Amino acid sequence: MSDPNIKTALRNYLQEALQKLRTKHLTTSVGKGVHTDPWDGYTAVEADLAAIDQQTRQMRRDIVRRDIRAVESIADRLLPGLETPQRVELALGLLQAHVQLLGKSKEWLTNGLIEEIDLSEHTEQLGNAIPLLTKSSDQEAKPATDSGPTFSEALPPFIELMTQEQGWRGQTLAQNRATYRMFAECCGDRPVSQYARKDLTQFYDLLRGLPALYSKSKEWSSLPLSEIVKRTKGTGHPRMTMKTVKRHFSALGRLFAYLKRRGEYVGENPAHGFEFPTKGRARNKRQMWEGEKLQKLFASPVWTGCLSETRRSTAGSLIIKDEKYWLPILGLFHGNRLEEFAQLVRSDVRCEGEIWFLDINDDDGKQVKNEQSKRRVPIHPRVRELGFLRYVEATAPDPTDRIFPKLQPGGPDQKLGYTFTKWWSRYRKDIGLYERGLDYHAFRGGVTTKLTAAHVIEDIRNELLGHEGTSVDQRVYQKGLPLAVLAEAIARVEWSEFAVSNSQPLSAAFTSAEAK
């Protein structure tokens, strides 16, 4: 930088800005962001770091393009009346100064304000740090290279997008975060543009070597993943299933697809093209409730008479119609995910055109797996015959009342179905029907099988079960099927093994007007 006035102005500006920035760090309240407000699911520091990275990339692009619009007013205030070449030179220096300021702020956010800042050191570095970015009479300017964001820098805005637009939360969010944490540990936190197929292969091999229960053992909790693989090799511990490996690669595939759309990764998606072979046919992997087992289940004390509320597996004369009674019945006829129905409130039980349905949504903090999970599920005629609407009327008179008020949140995701799942396992053991895989989710496979056997087309099945379609029409253009079509389809789910009955008539008091 040849003009001493410009160099002095930039040094003074940087020195003053550094002091103001440090003061802002010191005076910002705990939990508040220095540069931006915290986002949903992110701490103030995480949001600040993401904002810094975004601003830094933008300023570097402005420097390379000689786009000085963002700092023109500052340049004119510092040294008014400059000729165009000197004015551009000053403005580009200001952009570089702001890049340095953001870098210092990132350092403070990461390491803390642990020592006094030697301003002279930073200002002396300024003259050498600002590149010559304008054309001289005999030399073309050389722009600074930008290798793009690192993995940890690219991750927060991506997860924010998935949370807001794709409905990532609860277990889905936790699983995907775990994938990205494991990948960074395995392959390092590097600029995303530098990852290649060999890195994904390394991660693939690491996953295949991990024990299936590696995260639940205290013995391994403090060890690096590579050390867990090394210590457990040849020990006979069951390894991570291919289904789980595939889920990890699906999460990475979505991330790299996002990076490609943003131009931050060039080339083929490195997470695609891997194989995840499993033994046997996929449809034989998960069991479903049917035949003698299904008949025995609903002939057990919860539905035929138990001894007391705390002794549900012992035969007696008491039938208690609460969540333990209704949730398995709802699962059998609707194929819902447990949490979808466990968190229902009165206003979610609705009627439109004489068709009663359950509105699955994520309003007021309710959790759904993804956007496709939000849907309308007509109530099966058999469930209505059993008195479900009368139960809702008696249990949840107000719109915000929960349908199953006894359920309490629990587990890492604070799901309402947590305690039911624990009870459901104990109950199946007590009545001699406990089998691995024959759980609540097995009702879902049964409904899928029944709908397919009844020749219900795939897009209707997807709509009822909350699955994303495979075609463009299903995924993008189809915005919900008529309730009448869905109701006709769900009525085709029939179980000859199900013998539970209810002689009491449906209450007429629970009207569509009240439900609305």
Image: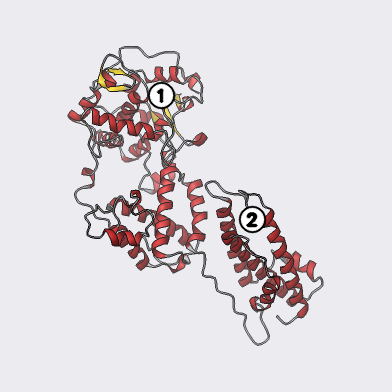
Name the quadrant containing residue 462. top left
For residue 135, above or below residue 254: below
Question: Residue 64 in the image: x percent, y percent?
Answer: 61, 72
Q: Is residue 328 visible?
A: yes
Depth order, front residue of 12/332: 12
Question: Residue 478 in the image: x percent, y percent?
Answer: 42, 41
Name the quadrant containing residue 52. bottom right
Helix, strand or loop for disc 2? loop
For residue 406, above or below residue 79: above
In the displayed structure image, the side of residue 314 where residue 82 appears, left or right: right
Name the quadrant containing residue 429. top left
**Mark 1 vs 2: CB contact within 8 A:** no
Q: Residues within 10 Å of mark 1 (few under 14, many from 20)?
A: some
Helix, strand or loop for disc 1? strand
Q: Amino acid at mark 1?
A: Ile
Depth order, front residue of 141/10: 10
In the displayed structure image, the side of residue 411 where residue 492 appears, left or right: left
Question: Residue 247 in the image: x percent, y percent?
Answer: 34, 52
Question: Which residue lies under the disc numbered 1?
Answer: 355
Q: Residues within 10 Å of mark 2 (few under 14, many from 20)?
A: some
Question: Residue 294 in the image: x percent, y percent?
Answer: 22, 28
**Distance of label 1 from label 2 (alpha carbons):** 51 Å
Q: Please give the name of the residue rendered at 30% of the width and 38% of the height, measured from the top-left corner.
A: 457
Question: Which residue lies under the disc numbered 2?
Answer: 35
Q: Is residue 273 visible?
A: no
Q: Please give the name of the residue rendered at 64% of the width and 54% of the height, measured from the top-left corner.
A: 34
